[in-house]
Structures are given as structure tokens and as C-alpha cells.
Amino acid sequence: MIVLHAPAHRLHHPTVEYYNGRAEPHAEQPGRIDNILDACRRLDLQIRIVEQPLSRRQLLTLHGRHYLRFLQQTCRGIPVDEQLMPSVFVHDTYTPLTAGTLHAARLSAGLAVAAAELVVAGEQRVVYALCRPPGHHAEADAMMGYCYFNNAALAAQQLASDGRRVAILDLDYHHGNGTQHLFYERSDVLYVSIHADPTDAFPYGSGYRDERGAGEGLGYTRNFPLTRPGNVEAYLRTLRRAIRTVQNFRPDYLVLSLGFDTYQGDPIGNLGLDVADYAAVGYAVANNLAYPTVIVQEGGYNVMALGALAESFLSGYQERNTTT
Ligand code: Q9C
Ligand code: ZN
């Protein structure tokens, strides 16, 4: 496994998010990636710096040109060290812009697509893209939930060329509304997600069990909302079911949308997972879904714990099952 990293992610530095008009410190901070990177170093993983902003042409394969123009024109006018809360092309009050946001978001998407290219070329079997800002809430024409471009979807789009079948397994605490919607009517990309019950968790409007795709894509979206957050046994049972769903699809490639906000100490999420549980999750994914894989970093907001969570996940992931 190699790790892709873009140090300039820190050009995106939101300060506050708004809850019904009340400002709170923004949870999606640059230090998140620093700590995950330290974990990768402790595990002696090869780290490759990639500072290739995703091209306009590639962004336009999934995102709209008016949305892109809005980001370009808006970011250009923001003074350094200030943030701007957009009023359009946005679905919430959690997703502000800073002067460097567009550049950082393009670098983040660039990491995910570069990872996909390495996997397609057969150069690497597994690539971990340290994406920041995250991506799975980003819609074709809207930023949302700390996300601007849909990194995992752009990686999947890249992997799906030449008629390849791609499965996306989304393990972030939140439902990946953007990823689901971008592939909702396609049968070449399967979207499977385990997340907090959207009845009482962000993004509220999607992630219910009865959303299963439409048209050609009917049956190629599968949601596993958890109604008993905190029950790790139930979580691992659901993970096994989600894994079987991916296996039945017989994908050529896997994209893993990996969020650490399922951790019991996360300030936003919490599905009850402890540090050691991440090793079990990593082991289950690596040994049951041994497809060429792009791992895309999504959420996870306990900045101090993120290193330990990533280290646990990655060590479980790299542990080979020698009995089969
Ligand atoms: N009281 C990602 O994990 N706030 N985005 C939720 C909490 C927004 C999360 C409300 C959460 C966005 C990529
Ligand atoms: Zn999340």
C-alpha cells in the first residue's frame, strides 16, 4: 500500500460553522491529516506527495460548470484568513469557503484520481488518498457537509472507464448523499453505505433503506442505516452484510470511503467503535474484498485520536489472513 498526500490541503482552513445561526468552531481542521500522516509514517508506509490539482475537464465529468465557475469567482475575492459562507450552490451552513478552498479541493480530488490511475495501471494494488477536504456529501452542483468535490466518486468514475465494474463501500458515520446521487441511475458503479440512521443524523434527507437506485441503477444502491448506534456487535454484523453485497456484485475495483467519525470519542459522529475495532474493520475489508482498491479519506473529527484510529485500521488492513 502507498499513501498519497498533498501538503497544501491546509490552504483550506474554515473557522466556524453555523447551527441555526449560532457559530461554532469548525470541526474539519488541517491537523486531522497531519495526525493520520504520522500514523502512516509509524507503519513505515511509503508516502508520495502529489500536488496535481484535478483538471477542469475531469471535474466536469461529475460536477456542473456553473458550480465550478461560482467557486472560481467566489474564492478569488476572499481575503486571506477570512472565510465566506456561500448562499448558493450549497445545502447547509457547515461548508464555508476560504481563499485557498478551491485549490485545496482540487488537490484533494487530484489525490483520489491519481490513486485510481495508479491502481488501473497495475502499479499499486491499494492506494490510500489522504483527501482533505472530504468529498462524499458533495453533489454535482453543490457543496455540503464540509465537502466541495466528490473525491470518491471522481475516483470511481476514473476506475469505471472501459466498462469496468466499481463498488464503493462508504464507512463514514454519515450517509454519502453526493456519491449515492451521482451514481443513482448507473449499474456499473455499486454504492453501499453503513451510516447513522438519517432520521436523526446528518444529512437527514437521504440514506434510508428504501433508496435502492433508479432506472438502470435499480438495485445498485444499498443503504444500511444503523438504528442502534453504539452497538458494535450490530455494526460488525452489518459490515459483514455490506461486504457480501459488494462480493455479489463482483467488482473489478473497490473504492473505500473511510471516515473515522464512527469512533466512540468523535465529537460529531459515534457509532460506538473503539480504537481496536478499527483493526477488525480493516481486516474484514482487506481479507473479504481483496480487489484493487482506492481508499479515500472522508470524515473523522477527534483530531487527537485520528492517528491511533488510522494506525489501528491500517494494521488490521495489512494483516493477511493466512488460513485461507
Ligand atoms: N451536530 C463528513 O463527515 N454537522 N461531513 C453535523 C452535528 C455536519 C460531516 C451536525 C457534519 C458533516 C465528511
Ligand atoms: Zn462523516
Image: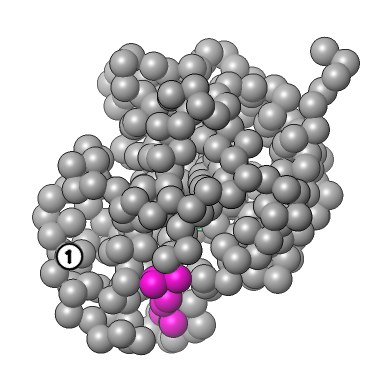
Residue 182: where, in percent of width, then height? 31, 38
Judge left or right: residue 54 versus residue 128.
Answer: left
The secondary element bearing badge 1 is classed as: helix
Vertical placement of residue 24 versus 105, above or below: below
Q: How many labels were placed on the picture?
A: 1
Residue 18: where, in percent of width, then height? 41, 79
Residue at point 63%, 58% (across, down): 37
Q: From the viewer's side, name the closer residue of 23 and 41.
A: 41
Residue at point 28%, 76% (across, down): 99
Q: From the viewer's side, name the closer residue of 95 and 158.
A: 158
Picture quadrant where residue 185 is located: top left
Res. 114 visible in picture: yes
**Is 48 included in the stretch rendered in magenta?**
no
Judge left or right: residue 184 versus residue 319.
Answer: left
Vertical placement of residue 120 versus 309, above or below: above
Judge left or right: residue 104 versus residue 235.
Answer: left
Residue at point 68%, 52% (across, down): 40
Vertical placement of residue 132 versus 231, above or below: below
Bin the neighbour count of mark 1 within 10 Å (Cα to Cα): few under 14, some 14-19, many 20 and up: some
Vertical placement of residue 50 versus 91, above or below: above
- What is the quadrant of the C terminus in the image? top right
Q: Which residue is farthest right? A: 323
Res. 138 visible in picture: no
Q: Please give the range of residues in magenta.
A: 10-18
Give the residue type that dot 1 points to.
Answer: Gln
Residue 309: where, in percent of width, then height? 73, 55
**Is 13 included in the stretch rendered in magenta?**
yes
Residue denoted by label 1: 72
Picture quadrant where residue 164 is located: top left
Residue 175: where, in percent of width, then height? 49, 47
